[in-house]
Amino acid sequence: MRRLLGAVFALFVASGVSFASGLKDENLLVGMPEGYKVAFSQNKNGLLVSEMIPRGQSLKTWKDMVTVQIHFSRRVPMKVLETQYTKVKSPICKQQDGRLLKKGRENGYEFGLFLTSCTTTPASKSETVLTKALLGNDSTYFVIKSWRSKVGKADIAKWSGYLSRVKVCDSRIEGRACP
């Protein structure tokens, strides 16, 4: 059932349909950013990945991307995620910085908001990434905003606002019901 919901999620994102009807069990509530399109979506081996880029960009030459990952039936402790995003250095980055911007609970679920940067990636591009990780009861969810361009405080504020609207809901739990 969880895999089916993930597939339905990808269709909702692709078509811009509202999530507001008939959601069952645990779900990630995330909308398509204005001006974006789905460039890639795959549901395989317990992982749903959907990549959205602005219209006019391509997967080969993107400068801005929003990625949704749903790790079905996997729950990673927030302490582990904090370490990964703030302390673990990637061998593909010449210089890397990672910070926890915010953590807490939303709709009863633990979340963390992380900002990371890497000066050189295998694609020879610097990348800045704003990630919201949500720990559901059934799965772990990530919504990731990536830039391969100069990022200012206004960009971080705008996309932090977008990520603040990303939630997990569960029709089985009173007080966490889906819309």
Image: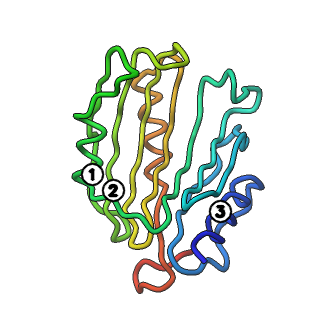
Residue 108 drawn at (x, y percent): 33, 71
From the viewer's perspective, is residue 86 above or below residue 140?
above
Q: Please, what secondary structure does the residue beneath circle 1 have?
A: strand
- Give left or right: position of 50 versus 126: right
Depth check, front residue: 43 or 156 = 43
Do callouts 1 and 2 mark residues in contact (Cβ within 8 Å)?
Answer: yes
Q: Which one is in front in this view, the residue at disc 1 or the one at disc 3?
A: 3
- Give left or right: position of 113 versus 67: left
| Res. 129 image quadrant | top left
Who comes first in sequence, dot 1 or dot 3? Answer: 3
Q: Residue furthest front?
A: 45
Residue type, label 1: Lys
Residue, x 43% and y 72% (percent of image)? 138
Residue 164 drawn at (x, y percent): 43, 51
From the viewer's perspective, is residue 87 above or below residue 68?
above
Residue 141 drawn at (x, y percent): 46, 57
Q: CA–CA distance between discs 1 and 3?
A: 25 Å
Q: Give the residue at mark 1.
A: 103
Residue type, label 3: Phe
Q: Please, what secondary structure does the residue beneath circle 3 have?
A: helix
Q: CA–CA distance between discs 3 and 2?
A: 20 Å
From the viewer's perspective, is residue 175 above or below residue 9?
below
From the viewer's perspective, is residue 13 above or below residue 102?
below
Who comes first in sequence, dot 1 or dot 2? Answer: 1
Who comes first in sequence, dot 3 or dot 2? Answer: 3
Q: Give the residue at mark 3.
A: 9
Residue type, label 2: Phe
Q: Give the residue at mark 2.
A: 111
Q: Which image quadrant: the C terminus?
A: bottom right
Q: Which image quadrant: the N terminus?
A: bottom right
